[in-house]
Amino acid sequence: MKMIRAIIRPEKADTVAEALAAAGLPSLTKAHVFGRGRTKGIRIGDVVYDEFPKVMLLMVVEDERLEQAVSTITETARTGSMGDGKIFIAPVEETYTISSGSKGL
């Protein structure tokens, strides 16, 4: 299993969530976050904007669904402009459902 953390533009969050659900990947957690990338923000005149609103989507997928999830997020979230976001992948050793105590997805 893999944990996907996708940091995307807020205006793309609903579109990406709908595309993931349509691809058979309906489970995710959405959090509103703030951050900056490599550019460390932008300067407009005397004002420096060093943190921007973003949405972080978190989801755990089986290894065989990873590429499908990543490509769905990438294709749906991409505008072609700086600030489209990042996707981070990490291994997940185990999962448990709290209500039932069952192990696994």
Image (cartoon, rainbow, N blue to C red):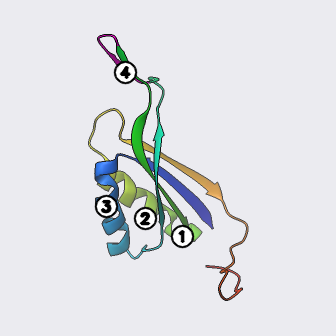
Q: Is residue 58 above or below residue 55?
A: below
Q: Marks 3 and 2, Cα distance to the nearest angstrom?
A: 18 Å
Q: Nearer the viewer, residue 75 or 14?
A: 14
- Residue 27 at x, y percent in the picture: 47, 73
Q: Marks 2 and 4, Cα distance to the nearest angstrom?
A: 33 Å
Sequence-wise, the earlier of marks 2 and 4 is: 4
Marks 3 & 4, CB-CB < 8 Å contact: no
Local SS, label 3:
helix
Tag 3: residue type? Asp
The image quadrant that residue 97 belongs to is bottom right
Tell me what residue is drawn at x 34 percent, y 56 percent. Answer: 13
Residue ID for mark 2: 68
Q: Is residue 58 above or below residue 82?
A: below
Sequence-wise, the earlier of marks 1 and 3 is: 3
Tell me what residue is drawn at x 36 percent, y 64 percent. Answer: 17
- Residue 76 at x, y percent in the picture: 30, 55
Tag 4: residue type? Ile
Residue ID for mark 4: 42
Marks 3 & 2, CB-CB < 8 Å contact: no
Q: Marks 1 and 3, Cα distance to the nearest angstrom?
A: 24 Å
Residue 44: within the magenta?
yes
Q: Marks 3 and 4, Cα distance to the nearest angstrom?
A: 26 Å
